[in-house]
Image (cartoon, helix red, strand yellow):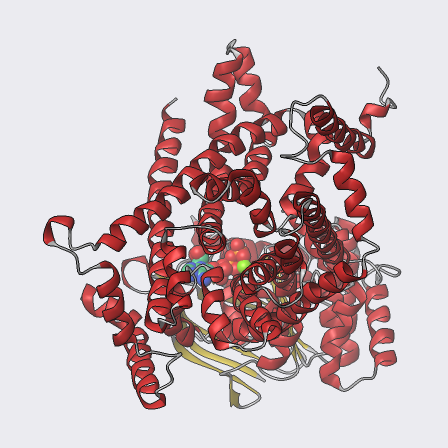
Amino acid sequence: MRFLRVAGRLWLVPVVLVAWEVATRTAEDIFFPPPTVIASRMHELWFSGPAQHLWLTEGALENIPTSLGRIFSGWLLAGVIGIALGIMLGRSERFSQFVDPIIQFGRAIPPPALLPLFLALFAIGTQMQVATIVFGIIWPILLNASDGARHVDRLHLETASAFGFSRGQRLMRVILPSAMPKIFAGLRLSLSLALILMVISELVGSTNGIGFQLLDAQRSYDYPGVWGSIVLLGVLGYVLNTAFLAAERRILSWHRTANQTT
Amino acid sequence: MTGRSPLSSRLLCGAAGVAGLFCVMELAGRSGLIDPIVFPLASTVVSRAAALAADGEFLADVASTLGAWAAGLLIAVLVAVPTGFLLGTLPRVEAALRPVLEFLRPIPSVALIPLALLLFSDRFDMKVAVIVYAAWWPVLINTMYGLKDVDPLAKETLRSFGFGRMAVLWRVSLPSTAPFIATGVRLAAAIALILAISAELLAGGASGIGTFIIEAGGSPDALEYIIAATIWAGIIGVVSNSLFTLAERRLFHWHLARTGGTR
Amino acid sequence: MLEISNLDHTYGSGPGAHHALGGIDLRVTQGELVCIVGPSGCGKSTLLRSIAGLLKPTGGTITLNGTPVDRTPDDLAVVFQDYSRSLFPWMSVGDNVALPLRRKGMDRGQRRAAAEEALEQVGLAGASGKYPWQLSGGMQQRVSIARALAYRPSLLLMDEPFGSVDAQTREDLEDLTLRVRNHHNMTILLITHDIDESVYVGDRVVVLAKAPATVVGDLRVDLPGPRDQITTRENPAFVHLRAEVGRLVRGMRSHPAAAS
Ligand SMILES: Nc1ncnc2c1ncn2[C@@H]1O[C@H](COP(=O)(O)OP(=O)(O)OP(=O)(O)O)[C@@H](O)[C@H]1O
Ligand SMILES: [Mg+2]
């Protein structure tokens, strides 16, 4: 039954794939390789390795973890800085008044415009990619954290001071938990932005990573390779988003039940 | 302390904050804390940025970026809004297409630039094409979300006076969804600018802010030019964002008044 | 003109289903003002939505002037119980009232004049430039009444139309409803919680019982002359009818002797 329901929901996917296959085979346009060709190229590029490497190829082992490492280190760093700064901004009206224009400006700079600057400051390599990612994705986290921290329920804060909570306790037990749902919304948005910025930074200046492989395929007119890299990035985006949603459900539900018991 | 103290004005505080940052950067450069060769002085950058405003070549680049940005955004809106309405009013079609859309959406749009470079011989068309692809998602998603938010009773009210489907769509669904569409367009505008500059960085050859930045890389005081151009990119972002926000407030004050104005 | 026979409606299906209407029979003739009373949640709004063609009942038939109702009939207006949601927040009050008049083929000027007139009748002269959300609940309710009255439908359905206004305004609106009905020969179905009100404005009072709704009483209101807020309410016939309806709503049999 469950299978039938899923099949009923997904029926268009195979239809589209078959139509795409037929259309590309009849058109015979080298720019548009058939999906089967793309799939076999993807297999060749990443998944035809030896069994002890989980069938991952040398290329996959070199490039995919590199890219993921950049995304996650950028995301983590932006998360830590963004949440800390955001909570400061949310709790101090004065501070937020002073830096607001700077933040509005920083947020408005299209992050790829900074690539050449970071390229000059850090030279080609992971440092420059992480800097680009951090700068580009910190804004949603920072703004959401400050919004969440600003709108903490007055009664909760008053309860905290009535029970003589220390500053640290107030922050960790009251402010941070109530800002959490907003912070998560920001973290999710910035995760998908991190993927975009990872790709663009690897396209502009890199010697490894999935983005570099994409560029490499493009330069050598390997059309199935270009399409394959795009598909791989799409799958990566899908997996990241799904994993994040699952994690969020877990963590926020823990936060909810914890709130009920205390 | 009275409430009239200068510290109570947002504008003054903000200006003081910007001035403070400028002074710190300038002092750090002049005292040798940051080597001016590694990172140029704040005053140098600002005067360079001011000079760029009168530089015809740079202005042509800005115009080219904004042209592609506006064209891409416009096409994206013209395609996404009707699609959103179609999907929103035909739940069967939406259910069938949803998985396909869910597979396409997570593809990072910048990954399409190398492909677009191969497909389009004209650099401007290429830019517009990737912008359209990236900008259409937020508009589509927001349109569909807004349609779900239309009050069924508002639709029934019009139907009870004998109006037909099209009239209900035009007089209730569209105005009620419009604020959501506007939010989508504002988000899309920011993404479109990111894509425009990314495409220019990768494409080279054509004109645009991104191209300007890449080409400045060759000159000895490259960083000055790069940072100055980046400042202008930021200013363009701020201006476009404020204009969209202002237009939203003007046009949809009824929406803000009901939802409390926070967003 | 309106005939309802054996109307039945069940919300949902399976264990969560709710049997809201359990075989309602009702006949309304042209120009009649019928009040429907019944306890909260008994299915009054459900009945009204079925008549307006906004809800497809699961059983029974509704015919209006000989044709079965399967979609919203022409020449009908509804004052919804949830009046504030039925006003369009993106339009001014005047535009809200004028909008349905497009169906009547009026030009802009006529529509505006008709809207102004209707707003004045409900005591909201000068509010037409405001937005609905700038008005109080009672004012919004009067706007939705004005919108229905300006439309001059041949069948008017009102779902607790005077619930949020003060006593004085309420009496004025009751009299306005009676006047409009007489002038334009409308047929009106008015749902109310207020037993006094039902007897005062109605030609008939139909009492519904709870879960599922059935008609437990259908009383003809024979009160002399044009009605008047003071004298009509003093009339012994009025007092008697009010008690009768009250007993029916409370679920007692209609004759006082049978209650013990
Ligand atoms: N859309 C719905 N889905 C499921 N049940 C519903 C729905 N609408 C109404 N009901 C149920 O049907 C019953 C009758 O509802 P209805 O709104 O007709 O009552 P009512 O007589 O108008 O009450 P009130 O006087 O409070 O307005 C209620 O018990 C309600 O819970
Ligand atoms: Mg009701």
Q: Residue A247, how many percent across, how many down?
A: 34, 41
User: What percent of the width, then of the height, locates residue B98?
Assistant: 39, 68
Q: Is residue A184 above or below residue A45?
A: above
Between A153 and C9, the one lying in front of the other is A153
Farthest residue to the top: give it.
A164
Side of B59 where A146 appears, left or right:
left
Q: Residue pushed farthest left? A: A51
Q: Is residue C221 visible?
A: no
Q: Is B61 on the left-hand or right-hand side of B106?
A: right
| Farthest-out residue, front | B220
Q: Quadrant of residue A37?
A: bottom left
| Picture residue at 33% right of the left edge, 67% below the top | A225
Mark count: 0
Q: Classify residue C61 as left or right of residue B140.
A: left
Above or below, comparing residue A98 to residue B110 in the picture: above
Residue appearing at x 36%, y 24% in the figure: A261
Quadrant of the image containing the N terminus of chain B: top right
Find residue A262 and report its horizontal and vertical position in percent. 39, 21
In this view of the protein, which residue sits in the foreground, C105 or C240? C105
Residue closer to the observer: C31 or A155:
A155
Percent position (x, y) of residue A122? 52, 39
Instruction: Confirm whether residue A164 shows in the render.
Output: yes
The image quadrant of residue A221 is bottom left
Front residue of this view, candidates A14 and A63: A63
Q: Locate residue C79: give its quadrant.
A: bottom right
B224 vs B102: above or below: above
